[in-house]
Image (cartoon, coloured by chain):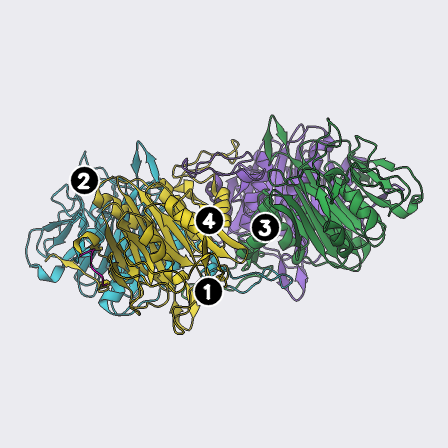
Chain colours: A yellow, B cyan, C green, D purple
Amino acid sequence: MCTSITYVTKDHYFGRNFDYEISYNEVVAITPRNYILDFRKIENLNTHYAMIGIAAGIADYPLYYDAMNEKGLCMAGLNFAGYAYYNEYEEGKENVSPFEFIPYILGQCTTVDEAKKLLNTINLVNINFSEKLPLSPLHWLLADKEKSIVIESMEDGLHIYDNPVGVLTNNPSFDYQLFNLNNYRALSSMTPKNNFSNQVDLEVYSRGMGGIGLPGDLSSTSRFVRATFAKLNSVSGHSEDESISQFFHILGSVEQQRGLCDVGDEKYEYTVYSSCCNADKGIYYYRTYENSQITALDMFKEDLNGNQIVKYPLVEKQQINYVN
Amino acid sequence: MCTSITYVTKDHYFGRNFDYEISYNEVVAITPRNYILDFRKIENLNTHYAMIGIAAGIADYPLYYDAMNEKGLCMAGLNFAGYAYYNEYEEGKENVSPFEFIPYILGQCTTVDEAKKLLNTINLVNINFSEKLPLSPLHWLLADKEKSIVIESMEDGLHIYDNPVGVLTNNPSFDYQLFNLNNYRALSSMTPKNNFSNQVDLEVYSRGMGGIGLPGDLSSTSRFVRATFAKLNSVSGHSEDESISQFFHILGSVEQQRGLCDVGDEKYEYTVYSSCCNADKGIYYYRTYENSQITALDMFKEDLNGNQIVKYPLVEKQQINYVN
Amino acid sequence: MCTSITYVTKDHYFGRNFDYEISYNEVVAITPRNYILDFRKIENLNTHYAMIGIAAGIADYPLYYDAMNEKGLCMAGLNFAGYAYYNEYEEGKENVSPFEFIPYILGQCTTVDEAKKLLNTINLVNINFSEKLPLSPLHWLLADKEKSIVIESMEDGLHIYDNPVGVLTNNPSFDYQLFNLNNYRALSSMTPKNNFSNQVDLEVYSRGMGGIGLPGDLSSTSRFVRATFAKLNSVSGHSEDESISQFFHILGSVEQQRGLCDVGDEKYEYTVYSSCCNADKGIYYYRTYENSQITALDMFKEDLNGNQIVKYPLVEKQQINYVN
Amino acid sequence: MCTSITYVTKDHYFGRNFDYEISYNEVVAITPRNYILDFRKIENLNTHYAMIGIAAGIADYPLYYDAMNEKGLCMAGLNFAGYAYYNEYEEGKENVSPFEFIPYILGQCTTVDEAKKLLNTINLVNINFSEKLPLSPLHWLLADKEKSIVIESMEDGLHIYDNPVGVLTNNPSFDYQLFNLNNYRALSSMTPKNNFSNQVDLEVYSRGMGGIGLPGDLSSTSRFVRATFAKLNSVSGHSEDESISQFFHILGSVEQQRGLCDVGDEKYEYTVYSSCCNADKGIYYYRTYENSQITALDMFKEDLNGNQIVKYPLVEKQQINYVN
């Protein structure tokens, strides 16, 4: 369904695969500082940090799937169907609807720690954007350069998990995903010794045998293990080109190829887009399923003191470099 | 180490991941019809089919890693260390050195069946290109639009296998790889029924659970299973853009991320390049590890009646499309 | 470490593998109705249901590992190290120490539902049997003929789980174990169809291929899956002989062979004993690692109105039937 | 289907699980030295080494499933359906039918090396025992105290494999089974180090985690890996009781529980019997699915100079030791 990761070389990178069977005319949306962030149950933010991210292109509101703000705080919402639970309105709490959640946090916070304070009083309230646009069941990865957390609103309350691996996929809840990594402790990027028995010679017939046991399917638990293994064993240079190249390769390890996840009615979940923010520089990079070239937008090239959302449709057509 | 696949939509596509820890200045090389193909032990081919492919850029000779000819016949050599065995010179046979093998076949044959006849008399003879360029231990995938075969020269003789799945990786021999697929017959692109027991409810907590059991590591046997599952369950449109996009996504399922396959001395095997030939149109597409944009060369835009190899260095620098 | 299961044919069966690297002179202990059950913090039970089970043979107290009472209620304690948490004494609660827990429940309850009521007020209090016999970190499987529950006292409180599969092993907590079964829904006792692809013939080269993916190691999560698969797919007759034979075979699927679980210092965890209670008839069957013959004790052949615990040492020497 | 193993402590042990969905009135049969071994195409053996084993109880002929001779040479036939190929009669060869094969070898050889010489001239000829008793497709494990070999008659000829692990199951051919062990080199009886990443703490939540990845199903390839892991990591004392106890526990690791291998028509393959020969002492031990006690027969307690086969029906009724 989706995979989000953080990655730090010289700069901080954050991004995600957005996996789904259809697209909602996604756009890259830059929300400048003076666009009025209208909230349903709490006071509006008339001025706030600017942010850039990918949003559904079906409303005027910045319905971000993932975004970063000008201070380098990053946040992504990922499918959490059957687990996410949004509450009734509660007096005395900050009643924020999930569709307002990313702008609410990124508009006001510069770090995860600042966000944590806001989360103390928050109530994720069950208010749809509109009749035609009901809430998605989500959980969120929130990261700055130093750390990341996972936010899950469930029937038994709001859970805030420190995320030591900087990876999030989907169901079930994050504590399970993290625990499940324990089962893979023997896996290695190196060729393992023969621990099976010293009574029999075993051949190293291939490179890469240290990873045997790594799951290769597209379920959320398998993607969590695979993305974590890829990220934590990743080796790249620190330049911008090397960093973003490696970032997309890590996301590539959990990409969903069209056809492998049949959701019925001849529909297939696939990786609609992959994104990579340079959170230090404010650049949003992305690729789409049909366009493997990286497209980039620099938020600081826009007028961040404006009051209108700036939208760029995704470049979805394959951009081939014909050299002869 | 490497993965090669065939794929047919409206046209026939053929390509491979080239996985290694270093690169040898690879180039795209077009060998026109009148370039003299010089062979060590058999008669030269003074005129032959033109071909295009990626070759080591370290000699004047077309040392192809993979190539297709103007008739749409495609061939790739993949690492087969410890299994490949090249013979002494044998009188009465066509004594072809492995480094000559791709030009030898693609220079003369238009189909797999034609190539099979040549293979009847061939002896893959142990002659190095030069002292500094010894032979690589290889086996080969050879394909036209209808079928593909695997060619393995081993100590017990030359093996020609029909390849019903159109996928090749590395060790061990192809019959093992094909047999090993039997262990994955229960895997599916669809959500499986609960076959475990009708006495307990089991939750479908994620999409993609039908693939649970698919191996996710980089060993040659795991890549064979994964690439085959991806290819055989692949769903794509038939246009050129959709076909090549899907082709690179299939190869992406077995891509080697740098860092995950540690070969010692701080070296890591990674996917140096991925290629995709349109064998019907004579276009060679590729991507490199650092450049995710597709680069393309059309062999028919070159003078195929020439007598000199035309070489294009790989475009390895990331080509980013900055839209603001 | 340990595996406990329930099984119902005509009668109700309950038992466990006790896996450890040493034994504490275990005995089969019958506690008659008038043996005074002495509790540290609550009132003694001067008369109670009689019970039979295996207990540590190192104290006069019935330190049961597992037991059933004369009404057919059965209970087993299994290792839960790192997860079990016993509390301080709490006023207004029934403060029962874990070492008193099995006699406390089996002494007073005839069904799981009755026990659940007692559990409402219980506080598992951190009181060692003696300085030399500290508490073991445990969780418990409690079962009657109709249902079973799991009881886990953790840092965040007492958890009572309905157990739809009637299996318990060890770490982590039961909700994880149950959730983890979801990953095995495709497994089957039957030969699976070829779901991999209709483009390739795959051979059914062996019977039993429907179970491919079942974990075969001795970790607690793998034993949970394997024992559940074995139990839920088990087929046996309903006679006493057939039932107990099948019961021991199910436990055999998760038996620990000596040497496969190395705990250091040349010690190995192995299945010290396996037990099977016929809870309807009051017969306690067991086998030990060194004695594969089933030994049986019938609680109703003892004077259940007595006031002294009756102990039988385990028959641990191999009993071979020499027929010539 | 079946698993056969060798095991050496102070003495040499050899045995097998016989897995099938029905039984053919198996008997323990002692063939004394002067029973005339009648062969179809070669000269009879009027006198020969005595042997003991389990045979089908449906003919006068010693149709052994597995046996040992008085010199300690042991042999078992295991299902090899779809792979075994028996030949036409061939002049100039020792034309032995597979049903004669075990008596033929055990009647004349004292060691594996002696048997290898006989195998040089053998032709396994396609002659049924009778119309009602056609040949089973088999391959064989042959072992003395020092070594073991596997004998497979296939369409491409007779294969004799040295067996470095002393284990045999069923399909496919032995070279595949042995190669497949390479994929499990990282598995260990010890707790593995955290090789996944030094950037995340992973919990050792259970003992036995070194074996994660070991397959737990009943297919022939999984039983081969599991039995080999169990045997090669096995730790036991050297006494007769400890040795045979451990031997049956190793076989227990690949036992087939009834219900887990559904072969249709409400039939289930299960472990009909497990056997363990002490090849040094001439004692044949066995257990059956319904009788977990070990039954023993000592060949040297029979008159080995006789000329009639001595048969003992299997003790199949559960022998319970009631101690009160």
Q: Nearer the viewer, residue A308 or B121?
A: A308
**Few, some or many C-alpha atoms within 10 Å of disc 1 (few <14, some 14-19, many ≥20)?**
some
Q: Is residue C193 above or below residue C87?
A: below
- Check contact, mark 2 vs mark 4: CB within 8 A: no
The mark closer to the camera, 1 or 4, is: 1
Query: Considering depth in this image, is B176 or A314 the residue closer to the camera?
Result: A314
Task: Kindly report the distance in space between the C-alpha atoms of the residues bearing marks 1 and 4.
Answer: 19 Å
Chain name for mark 4: A
Same chain assignment for discs 1 and 4: yes
Q: Where in the figure is residue B306, as x and y percent of width and height? A: 5, 56
CB under 8 Å between discs 1 and 4: no
Q: Are marks 3 and 1 on the same chain?
A: no
Q: CA distance from mark 3 to mark 1?
A: 31 Å
Q: Is residue C75 left or right of residue B141?
A: right
Mark 4, residue position: A160
Q: Earlier in the sequence, mark 1 or mark 4?
A: 1
- Please, which chain is the residue tagged with disc 1 on? A
- Figure quadrant of residue B262: top left
The CA span between labels 1 and 2 is 71 Å
**Residue D63 seen anywhere in this rendered image of the structure:** no
Image mark for residue A126: 1
